[in-house]
Amino acid sequence: MILESALLHVTQGDTNQFKRDFSTASEIISSMPGYIQHELHQCLENETEYLLLVQWETLEAHTEGFRTSDAYEDWKKLLHHYYNPFPKVKHFTRII
């Protein structure tokens, strides 16, 4: 299992619409092969920051499967315009 993380900085004032659009985008990502589950957390200290955690069966399920799919294009259209700066995505593997 691979854990993808992304710290999302949502443009000030757009958080309510972002949450609605993320709900729609959740249906997209959850339908992808190799997807396990995801969580979105809102920061308590700064309400425009979110932490996205996605579990994938393999790194390739995310980087090659999802990122090169037509579904990813729909995901981008829904969400990418909210981010400033654009998030840095990292992948982790559990060791304990």
Image (cartoon, helix red, strand yellow):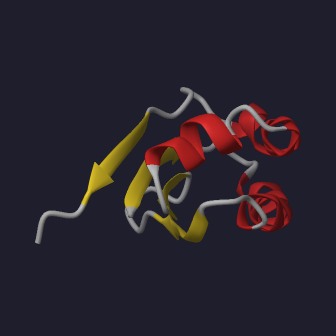
| Observer able to see residue 9 | no
Q: Nearer the viewer, residue 47 or 4?
A: 4
Q: Residue at x 86, y 64 (%)?
A: 24
Q: Residue 55 appears at what percent x and percent y?
A: 48, 64
Q: Can you say which quadrant of the picture contains the C terminus? A: bottom left
| Observer able to see residue 29 | yes
Q: Residue 82 appears at what percent x and percent y?
A: 72, 38
Q: Nearer the viewer, residue 82 or 60?
A: 60
Residue 71 lies in what quarter of the image?
A: top right
Q: Can you say which quadrant of the picture contains the N terminus? A: bottom left
Residue 3's place in the image compared with 44, above or below, is above
Relative to 51, 76 lies left or right: right
Q: Residue at x 77, y 32 (%)?
A: 81
Q: Residue at x 45, y 45 (%)?
A: 59
Q: Residue 37 appears at what percent x and percent y?
A: 57, 73
- In the picture as drawn, the residue positioned furthest to the left comes out as 96
Residue 66's place in the image compared with 50, above or below, is above
Q: Nearer the viewer, residue 33 or 53?
A: 33
Number of marks present in the image shown: 0
Q: Residue 32 appears at what percent x and percent y?
A: 73, 59
Residue 89 lies in what quarter of the image?
A: top left
Q: Residue at x 88, y 38 (%)?
A: 70
Relative to 34, 81 lies left or right: right
- In the picture as drawn, the residue positioned furthest to the top comes out as 85
